[in-house]
Image (cartoon, coloured by chain):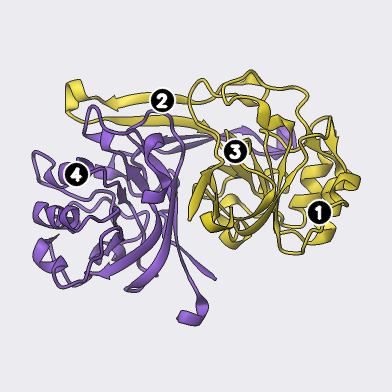
Chain colours: A purple, B yellow
């Protein structure tokens, strides 16, 4: 069994959405004074690798603690769309055989950027046609390798089309180390009660024999 | 495949170590003003379900982002020690067949308490003899169902004996729903760079056929 960590490293220096830095680490115990270390962490619900719950955009939508973990733990297909500029459309996805109930991870050229780089205004995103396509396929969850899954859509179509179907969105994956393949995907967001989203750690697991 | 969530629900009201409340949720976007919700979360590195890295107590110890995830993802034995009062000793553990490289989870009467109850001063803990026993067995990681794994040990023997051997400690598990058995254990702490510990989500996985 091999584990690939596909999580965004979390620190005060990390890339922040639209460069609005949120993360702070404050030492509350130190070796010098206390013989041990402890820290208080401030973090956004949408910092780094995180899962958007329906209640991010839908008033009566499920909150992050209400999402069935089976939706974000299971078989996944990682699609390598690194040569797609600007946005992923339904046409790009139609090249693939997408099974219902699969978790779909989208690797794009966003993965070329480093975890502490300035925010990338023109990140590759999933457009509304592609979100509709994935919803129609009946996928379980959708993940992408940037801090947002859409931009420049006033009505937030991409989020809406997925979240209305109770399809969780995983943003902020780091996929540079992962090749197009099938994996077991495990994404575990913090159990934040009643919130719109939560930071998560995400991994891919595969048998080394299959490599 | 069945998933049992064994994570402590995180909220401002949750039980805090020695009742020192840390968690706050602050809404930074609301439906009323922004048409979407976002939240800033303040949390301790040792809040709820969390993993202690060696650097919690050891100056040159590994930090939480340096822990191999393979240490806290894999086969585990859940030992039901619910009838043990006060503390778990080597003698209690010697009744079990503990294999090297296993992750050991300790279910105690601590699991009877609710997630928002006042802090339990007399929680059942793992004493130094038991920590030494588990280190000698060569276990991969040790988890327990309270916010600490030891109390009343001035030199923090239990932590030291495990962390010196690079055995991560998972504290704050919720094991009321889990019976003594073998499981796949997955614990994913946030990738907090350079810190002493991190909040985590933890699950058990088993085949329903085996139930």
Residue B121 rendering spot, x and y as whole percentages: 75, 22
Where's residue B142, x and y in %?
71, 49
Asked if badge 1 and badge 2 are on a common chain, one would say: yes
Mark 1 or mark 3: name the one nearer the start of the chain.
Answer: 1
The structure residue drawn at horizontal position 35% and vertical position 60%, both measured from the top left corner, is: A114
Sequence-wise first label, 1 or 2: 2
**What residue is pinned by disc 2?**
B25
The Cα atoms of the two marked residues, 2 and 4, are separated by 23 Å
Q: Using the image, name the chain to which the residue with label 3 belongs.
A: B
Q: Looking at the image, is mark 2 or mark 3 nearer the viewer? A: 3
Q: Residues within 10 Å of mark 2 (few under 14, many from 20)?
A: many
Task: Read off the residue under disc 1.
Answer: B134
* Labels 2 and 3 share a subunit: yes
Please name the residue shown 9% across and 66% down the image.
Answer: A91
- Disc 2 secondary structure class: strand
Question: How far apart are labels 1 and 3 at the CA level?
Answer: 24 Å
Badge 1 density bin: few <14, some 14–19, many ≥20, Cα 10 Å: many
User: Is residue B192 something one can see in this rendering?
Assistant: no
Which secondary structure, mark 4? helix
Of circles 3 and 4, the one toward us is 3
Identify the residue under disc 4.
A159
Same subunit, labels 2 and 4: the answer reads: no
């Amino acid at each position: 069994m091999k584990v690939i960590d596909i999580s965004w490293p979390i620190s005060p220096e990390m890339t922040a959405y639209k460069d609005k830095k949120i993360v702070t680490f404050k030492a509350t115990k130190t070796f010098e004074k206390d013989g041990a270390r402890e820290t208080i962490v401030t973090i956004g619900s949408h910092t780094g690798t995180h899962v958007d719950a329906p209640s991010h955009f839908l008033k009566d939508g499920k909150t992050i603690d209400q999402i069935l973990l089976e939706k974000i733990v299971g078989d996944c297909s990682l699609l390598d769309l690194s040569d797609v500029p600007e946005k992923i459309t339904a046409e790009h996805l139609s090249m693939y055989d997408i099974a219902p109930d699969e978790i779909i991870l989208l690797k794009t050229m966003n993965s070329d950027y480093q975890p502490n780089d300035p925010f990338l205004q023109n990140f590759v995103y999933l457009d509304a046609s592609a979100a509709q396509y994935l919803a129609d396929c009946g996928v379980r969850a959708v993940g992408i390798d940037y801090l947002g899954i859409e931009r420049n859509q006033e009505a937030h179509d991409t989020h809406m089309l997925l979240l209305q179907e109770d399809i969780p969105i995983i943003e902020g994956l780091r996929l540079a180390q992962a090749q197009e393949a099938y994996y077991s995907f495990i994404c575990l967001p913090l159990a934040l009660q009643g919130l719109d989203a939560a930071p998560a750690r995400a991994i891919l697991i595969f048998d080394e024999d299959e490599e």
